[in-house]
Amino acid sequence: MKRMRAARVGVATLALALLTSACAGERSGTDGQTASGATEASSAESFGTLESPCGKGDAKGATDQGVTDDSIAIGYGDDRGFATIPGLNAEMGDAVKAMIDWCNGQGGINGRKIVGHQYDAAYTQAASVMQQACTQDFMLVGQGFAYDEAAEPVRVGCNLPTVAGFTVGPNSSMGPMKFEPLPYPVDKYNSAPLQLAAKEFPEFKDVSLIASSSPPVLQGTAKVTTVLKEMGIEPKDCGVLLSAQGDASYVPFAERYKDCGVKALFTSASPGAGQFSLLESMSRIGLKPTLMYEATWYGKTVSDWNAGSGAGDNMHVGLAFQPFENADKVPAVKKYLDIVGGAGGKTALLGMQATSAFLLWATVAKDCGSDLSRQCMVDGLSKVTKWDGGGLHGASDPGENLPTDCALLVQLKGATWTQTVPDKAGDFTCNEKWVVDTDPATAGVTLNADRVSTKFLTDKVIKPSA
């Protein structure tokens, strides 16, 4: 029983990480200025606005573990073998596999072909997977493991740098030698979706947050509550706490929200049977608040449900990624769908995130040339302070582990998602002031002066050169 409880908490932790990580163009420091990712690069082979980092060359030398004259070995993967949720995050491994083939088809990185070692952490085997990677891989690229916190001491212990697709644990998200295309650090929060909701929906001043007994959802709810208060919005406390294991009836909760005078709702929970039942119960009693939900609500599961229910027709979701519906306007999205979908892979937002991670890694690896080493990669990655994956997402700062300050809103009607804010599909709204400070202590992590977790830190880790 204890093991099952731990699994449920872990899955909820993953869900929180996914929703926040999928919130992420050009960044702007001006209030409400839009940024577009819709201009394609002019090179013969490109990925949206990004010139392809792949191609022929004459790079030579066995310069580090996993690097030879003619190959570079990288590790990647997901938790697709998790029995409770088969295919968990399989879109991430599918994306990296397809991108490796795409890159090798152009000649690899400076002529070195990429050899990919695909790992299945199956949720509970992340530490074991990391031990394998430590023996053969140059780096980890584009992976997403739910239990990465258990693997973090292994990764740090063997000095294995990573450009992760996403990280979950607080020590992993703030770990040394770790870079992400769309960081979600414990000490910073991108409030852009909340800011856009407050601007677009006057009724958002009467918002209530849907809390759950799930610890990570409670943590996310507490963080959002703090941010809203800093924005001058006092969320309504209607005394509702959903059970993470499900409730017998959701009508009493719906009635409580109605009696509370709620006009808008926000949740950090992921979509599921309980959340769907709550929305359907509100619809039955005539309560139709504006819904401002996290990024995990964007997707086919929710749109398929709403096609039959209609209870989510007033749902808005904040994204820091371009939605698939913008593929005809954003070349990078179309390129992702063509490459990964064309290879028979599963496509989803996290797949785009893994794709962006691969492109970030490949771009820096190309610059290292024949001097390809882990030190060169850490040096190069630490200098990348503006990255949008060729237009896949809002610009972030991987080198400093800082999130994007951009977002867009999509609305669900029937089974269709449509961008509503900004008005022009393919644009983001960005503002550097929307990235706010949070207390890392609430995540249970201690950071040093470089904002790196000290828990597994040693004096042997690879640091950016002075």
Image (cartoon, grey):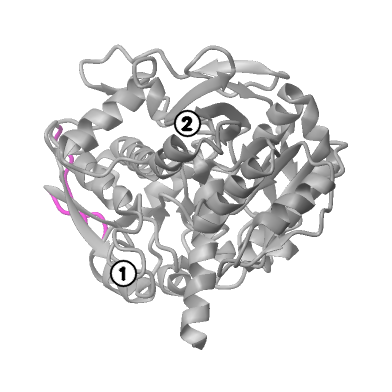
Q: Which residues are magenta?
A: 57-69
Q: Where does the image place residue 314, in percent across and percent down from the top left?
A: 60, 31
| 150 relative to 224, above or below | below
Verify whether residue 92 appears in magenta: no
Q: Where does the image place residue 204, in percent across and percent down from the top left?
A: 77, 33
Q: Secondary structure at mark 1?
A: helix
1 vs 2, front mark: 2
Q: Kindly indicate the quadrant of the structure image that contains residue 173.
A: bottom right
Q: Secondary structure at mark 2?
A: loop
Sequence-first tag of 1 and 2: 1
Lateral position of residue 244 relative to residue 331, left or right: right
Q: Residue at x 63, y 43 (%)?
A: 284
Near-viewer residue (234 or 77): 234
User: Mark 2 = which residue?
Assistant: 393
For the image shown, how many numbered marks are present on the structure? 2
| 89 relative to 37, above or below | below
Near-viewer residue (78 or 369): 78
Main SS, magenta residues: loop
- Give the residue type that dot 1 points to: Cys
Q: Is residue 205 visible to the viewer in this orientation of the structure? A: yes
Q: Is residue 110 visible to the viewer in this orientation of the structure? A: no
Near-viewer residue (189 or 249): 249
Q: Kindly indicate the quadrant of the structure image that contains residue 109.
A: top left
User: Mark 1 = which residue?
Assistant: 134
Q: Residues within 10 Å of mark 2 (few under 14, many from 20)?
A: many
